[in-house]
Image: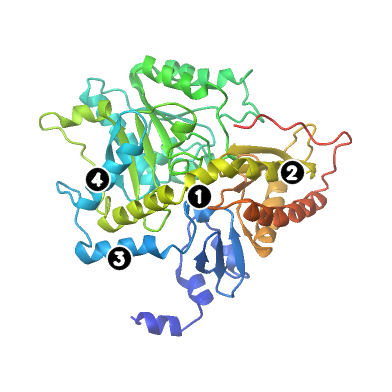
Amino acid sequence: MATTEQAVSQGSLQELAKRHLWMHFTRLGAYADHDVPIIVRGEGCHVWDEKGNRYFDGLSALFCVNIGHGRADVAQAGADQAKDLEFFTNWSYAHPPAIELAARIANLAPGDLNRVFFTSGGSEAVESAIKLSRQYHKLTGNPNKTKIVAREIAYHGTSLGALSATGITPLREPFEPLTPGGVHVPNTNTFRLARGMVSEADLAEAVAHKIEFEGPDTVAAVIMEPVQNAGGCFTPPEGYWQRVREICDEYDVLLVSDEVICAWGRLGHWFGAERYDYVPDLITTAKGITSAYAPMGAVIASDRVAEPFLQGTNSFVHGFTFAGHPISCAVAMANIDVMENEGVLDNVRAHEGEFRAMLESLRDIPIVGDVRGAGYFHAIELVKDQETQASFSDEESETLLRGFLSGELFKRGLICRADDRGDPVIQLSPPLIAGPEEFAEMESILRPVLEEAAKRMSVEAMAAGPRVPRRTA
């Protein structure tokens, strides 16, 4: 076996990446004749690759580098912690960083969500919430309440339990049979209401109908994101969350707010539940909790959910070795310090209107069908015809997104997501420190690329001008 130095000397980073690195959610065959994008440095809203090319990070890496790149002070907090205690487990033990971070999170969380169960990331947080919901109902005398209601096209993680909640068929099929119990309802895509939905009010009522159909004594929890990621930043209609909360209370079902993306300022608040004025029973979170400077996730539970686990010999029989890692906790504390001391959430609230206005200005390009989202979390849906809202076929979407847009946007210096888990969209989620200057930089790349995409796909402008923009959330 070669040493690290010997291995690197035996080939370039490109050669080593193609030979040894198994990248996630990646068509590895696509790099047989193309270079792997190798990012080597970051500062603020930008990153650089191994060749010195500069890119605007319009996706915050993966919706997670909220305070921007290159904050040595946040990284240093982890190094300083390692000098005192590099690691100790949370299995029947505690350490100061975990205690202090749990208390700080509880102070920021809505309602009576005062108990924090740490994980190593987002899928683990969702997996933990599913298991917690099931065990909670067993301890409270409802052992048959095991099913999880989620939304179609929603992404909730990749572990088998979380995947049963995920509503994206191509992500589920390769791993079936899944953990049983995942059932789904229409999402809040008001640009294209789901079949059977006559009005926006029907979207919340579909949750009640699903619980009634499955049997209320079999449903443990409803899990939803404040703004749904997959499909392209679906925002909730007015009153949606309040009605879902009522439904969960009526049927003794726990409400899980999946905020792996939507927490920590992404929507301009500590938690997305604050923006839409509801109090869930559980919050799952990760990503922005450390701005990705160290891996971490968490489930934040209400006092009501925690109460049965505090009695007698009961315990939540679940855990992860590295959950609540002292270094990650220290990094999270430093990250929250930056957000508080530098007004990061205030920046999102102050400038999200300008971010949205920049995206709305692209509606004169005939391929732009819809603009939606909230905070610094938006999507542009691409269409064949603005008037009819006709979408692209699977083959056309493949040609549009992977055959042109993804590569061209990156080539011109913009990292974002061109996605078709649903209809084709471009998702934009810049670091929360971005402002008008960065929005202009994004627009200078988006506009010419989308104009070229319209020509390539033979999408023509409407004679009467673009469709009237829908309500912003």
- Placement of 43 over or under 214, stated as above or below: below
What label does residue 63 carry, if any?
Answer: 1
* Residue plotted at (60% across, 53% down): 416
Q: Please name the amino acid that badge 4 sits on.
A: Gly
What label does residue 456 carry, if any?
Answer: none
Can you give x and y, in whole percent of width and height, for residue 122 in the image? 39, 46
Q: Secondary structure at mark 3?
A: helix
Can you give x and y, in whole percent of width and height, for residue 366 in the image? 80, 43
Q: CA distance from mark 1 to mark 2?
A: 23 Å
Q: Answer whether labels 4 and 2 touch (C-beta < 8 Å).
A: no
The residue to which callout 4 is attached is 319
Q: Nearer the viewer, residue 100 or 251?
A: 100
Can you give x and y, in whole percent of width and height, for residue 176 in the image? 43, 41
Q: Secondary structure at mark 4?
A: loop
Q: Please name the amino acid that badge 3 sits on.
A: Ala
The residue to which callout 2 is attached is 361
Other residues around mark 1 within 10 Å, as few (<14) / some (14–19) / many (≥20): many
Q: CA distance from mark 3 to mark 1?
A: 24 Å
Q: Secondary structure at mark 2?
A: helix
Q: Is residue 214 left or right of residue 450?
A: left
| Precedes in sequence: disc 3 or disc 2 | 3
Can you give x and y, in whole percent of width and height, for residue 63 in the image? 50, 49
Q: Answer whether labels 3 and 2 touch (C-beta < 8 Å).
A: no
Q: Please name the amino acid that badge 1 sits on.
A: Phe
Nearer mark to the viewer, of 4 and 2 = 2
